[in-house]
Image (cartoon, rainbow, N blue to C red):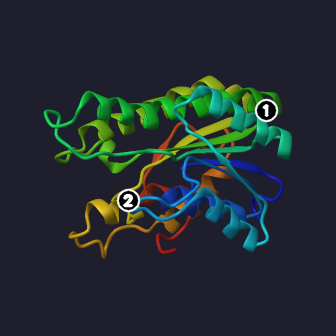
Amino acid sequence: MKLKGKIAIVTGASRGIGKAIALALAREGAGVVIAARTEEEKGPLPGTIHKTEDEIRALGGRALAIKTDVTKEEEVEAMVRRTIDEFGGIDILVNNAGINIPGTLVEISTKRWDLIMAVNLRGTFLCTRAVLPKMMEQKRGSIINLSSILGTRATGGNLAYGVTKAAIERFTSGLAEEVKEYNIAVNALCPNYTETEGIKLWYFNVDRSLWQKPELWGRYAVSLACQDASSLTGRTLTAEELDKECGQGSAY
């Protein structure tokens, strides 16, 4: 139970990598707040904040689902206040909430471009800013941002998404310097192609047999959540780099 007594917020935890991270943190003893928008399954994507909450509780863990739109400042701040009221503190923030709408630059509308920027970048900024005062007061914390291989690898139709992930890596390194004196670690996970529910929907006719699994990133998130600013901070880490840093094999 590496994280016994710790409190974590995981955004976008109703499915995919976010859900896998929430479950992994809970298995190691952390109380987990599931912050996402999905309360009911309405479209083709499965999963809700309440299903993730139920799965954590079935494991014997502590969980609290809070409906949150990470692009809205007032909802983010309310979610953080409720977390502190319910659990007394915040030790871990995982900025996982993200969206991608594939399309070339000439195809993508301004509305869609702005939505991708709002969820991926503004959401990361708002959630981080909201938890920092408590972490600074505690003089400890771990912030984990989700980047992507598409932040550095150019592929057709993913420019807007890639721009946000490149920016998140710069956000990670810059913030790490700002909060190092408060013993707050800031790192980013950089998944390669990972088989999530959203990916299955968009790339249903692609061979995904060799793709990474969300559970892999759950285990790596646990490793980063255990770090402080004196051990590992300011890094964006791939699976291979995490294996070297944390001494873990890539199989989950």
Residue 216 in percent (x, y) is at 50, 66
Q: Of all residues shown, which one is farthest toward the top?
A: 178
Tell me which residue sits at (50%, 41%) in the image: 235
Q: Of all residues shown, which one is farthest toward the left?
A: 106
Tell me which residue sits at (37%, 36%) in the image: 116
Among the two numbered marks 2 and 1 on one chain, the one whose residue lies closer to the N terminus:
1
* Residue 157 shows up from this direction: yes
Amino acid type at image mark 2: Gly
Q: What residue would you read off at disc 1?
A: 139
Tell me which residue sits at (85%, 39%) in the image: 85
Residue 78 in percent (x, y) is at 71, 33
* Alpha carbon distance from label 2 to label 1: 37 Å
Crowding near the residue tagged with mark 2, few <14, some 14–19, many ≥20 C-alpha atoms within 10 Å: some
Image-quadrant location for residue 43: bottom left
Element assignment for label 2: helix
User: Does 202 sit left or right of 238 as displayed?
Assistant: left
Q: Which is closer to the viewer, label 2 or label 1? A: 2
**Residue in front for this viewpoint, 121 or 224:** 121
* Residue 244 shows up from this direction: no
Amino acid type at image mark 1: Lys
Q: What residue would you read off at disc 2?
A: 198
Residue 7 in percent (x, y) is at 76, 49
> Which of the image's four quarters has the N terminus?
bottom right
Element assignment for label 1: loop
Residue 108 in percent (x, y) is at 21, 36
User: Does 53 sit left or right of 153 as displayed?
Assistant: right
